[in-house]
């Protein structure tokens, strides 16, 4: 159970409120744990029968109280069994059909005091998916209609070990331990594997009192992590209930490499950092399309600061990096590929001292794709629709833009932005914002790719 507490007044009322909510939550948990059919209802709209003649149980809210009713107790019984206090109870129910879990919240109020408990309960003997009747977003008080088995006749199943490692063939000798069981018959066809298991054969079945030992053989799908289940069909067990035990499957492989920055657009000469979640794993890589060779020193990733030993991938052109991680005692990771593409970026920006100018340095040579105007000295420039904006912050949310008058390509690696006079009291930090779609295209001379959208600051 998971408990969530709300603040409330102190004294005897606190204890009374908490007790009622806890008792209601425990009752609902014990009832639903052994249910094999469950239907969630809207308490305000569902017609509870005056007389119950079948095996159905009803838990519902009426007049701010929680009630239980079945054929053994045709007079609705308040839960908990008190009516002399001012505690009101409400019930909220959610479900996750994929694993037979029901999540519910019991909310108690007494005047201005509030207390609630949130509980997850696993429905052990569920035969069909959990249904909903008349439940909508406007439902404020829920209820549950269910059928359950006698706990004394329930057979539970667990698997030892419940953790295996992925290594193509999984280990033999899974122990399936049956508790409170009375076996009708126990044969190979009453076992099946699901989840990550592709196939299963049973070589031997051995029964020793309550313990069934299966020697099994099969294969796992190639997965990094996952879950699998062993199912015992109901015809083999007292009560005819299907039982499922879950096995966690963990990889024997080294965790595959990750790359930072992520694959995609990068500036020229960008260094790529490789890592693995497996502690002390060694990483190998290639950048020329060849296969990774663990015996090749130049393939081993080494981020040391020693320039003579350092070996890291640096993107000098469009490239696909292959990378693999290894560690002694584990299998090699799967090979990951990371594709990078060179795009022009703004490398830095600086303000020209005592002038209304900013110098922008680029990561590679560019050209302007547009029709320029010309200064008196014959140098081309572009008007303020070139895509550059300059602003400073008067406050965190208040940008004050400064008019851009000219944008000049100073040389193939740098651009000059001329602005109008910067107002006094503007502060020391200025931001240069570039967005190509609002102006002329600025393209790389080598790849013809557009300058990337950027915002960068300077003092």
Image: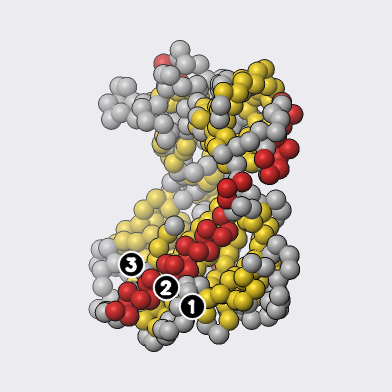
Residue 294, x across and y down, in percent:
47, 16
Judged from this view, the residue extending furthest toward the top is: 295
Residue 261, x across and y down, in percent:
45, 43
* Crowding near the residue tagged with mark 2, few <14, some 14–19, many ≥20 C-alpha atoms within 10 Å: many
Residue 177, x across and y down, in percent:
55, 32
Q: Which of marks 3 and 2 is in front?
A: 2
Asked whether 56 or 302 is in front, the reply is 56
Q: What element carries label 2?
A: helix
Asked whether 252 or 256 is in front, the reply is 252
Q: Residue at x 27, y 63 (%)?
A: 459
Work out how far the residue at label 3 is from the one at label 1, CA to CA, in angstroms.
59 Å
Left/right placement of residue 140 relative to residue 21 reads right
| Residue carrying label 1 | 89
The count of marks equals 3
| Residue carrying label 2 | 20
| Residue carrying label 3 | 430
Say the numbered circle drawn on residue 186.
none
* Crowding near the residue tagged with mark 1, few <14, some 14–19, many ≥20 C-alpha atoms within 10 Å: many
Would you place residue 233 above or below residue 434 in this image?
Answer: above
Chain-order first, disc 1 or disc 2 = 2
Contact (Cβ within 8 Å) of mark 1 with mark 2: yes
Residue 207, x across and y down, in percent:
60, 23
Contact (Cβ within 8 Å) of mark 3 with mark 1: no
Whether residue 248 is visible: yes
Q: Is mark 1 on a helix, strand or loop?
A: strand
């Amino acid at each position: 159970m998971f408990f969530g507490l709300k603040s409330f007044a102190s004294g005897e009322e606190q204890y009374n409120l908490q007790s009622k909510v806890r008792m209601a939550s425990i009752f609902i948990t014990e009832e639903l744990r052994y249910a094999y059919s469950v239907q969630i209802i809207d308490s305000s709209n569902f017609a509870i029968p005056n007389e119950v003649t079948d095996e159905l149980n009803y838990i519902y809210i009426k007049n701010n109280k929680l009630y239980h009713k079945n054929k053994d107790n045709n007079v609705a019984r308040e839960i908990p069994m008190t009516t002399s206090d001012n505690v009101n109870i409400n019930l909220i129910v959610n479900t996750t059909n994929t694993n037979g879990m029901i999540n519910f919240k019991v909310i108690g109020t007494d005047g201005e005091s509030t207390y609630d408990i949130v509980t997850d309960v696993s429905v052990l003997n569920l035969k069909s998916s959990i249904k909903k009747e008349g439940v909508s977003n406007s439902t404020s008080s829920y209820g549950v209609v269910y059928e359950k088995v006698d706990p004394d006749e329930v057979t539970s199943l667990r698997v030892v070990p419940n953790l295996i490692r992925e290594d193509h063939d999984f280990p033999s000798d899974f122990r399936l331990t049956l508790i409170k069981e009375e076996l009708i018959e126990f044969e190979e066809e009453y076992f099946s594997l699901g989840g990550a298991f592709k196939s299963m054969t049973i070589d031997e079945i051995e029964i020793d009192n309550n313990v069934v030992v299966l020697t099994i053989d099969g294969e796992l799908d190639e997965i990094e992590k996952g879950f699998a289940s062993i199912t015992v069909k109901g015809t083999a067990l007292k009560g005819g209930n299907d039982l499922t035990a879950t096995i966690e499957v963990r990889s024997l492989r080294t965790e595959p490499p990750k790359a930072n920055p992520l694959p995609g657009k990068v500036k020229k000469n960008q260094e790529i950092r490789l890592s693995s979640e497996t502690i002390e794993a060694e990483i190998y890589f290639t950048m020329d399309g060849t296969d990774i060779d663990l015996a090749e020193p130049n393939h081993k990733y080494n981020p040391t600061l020693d320039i003579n030993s350092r070996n890291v991938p640096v993107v000098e052109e469009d490239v696909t990096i292959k990378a693999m991680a290894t560690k002694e005692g584990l299998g090699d990771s799967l090979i990951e590929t990371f594709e990078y593409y060179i795009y022009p970026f703004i490398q830095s920006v600086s303000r020209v001292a005592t002038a209304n100018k900013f110098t922008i340095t680029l990561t590679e040579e560019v050209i302007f794709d547009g029709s320029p105007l010309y200064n008196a000295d014959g140098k081309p420039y572009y008007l303020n629709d070139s895509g550059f904006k300059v602003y400073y912050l008067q406050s965190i949310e208040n940008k004050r833009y400064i008019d851009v008058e000219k944008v000049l390509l100073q040389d193939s690696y740098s651009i000059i932005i001329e602005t109008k006079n910067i107002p006094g009291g503007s502060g020391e930090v200025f931001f240069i914002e570039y967005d190509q779609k609002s102006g002329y295209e600025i393209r790389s001379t080598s790849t013809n790719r557009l300058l990337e959208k950027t915002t960068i600051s300077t003092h």
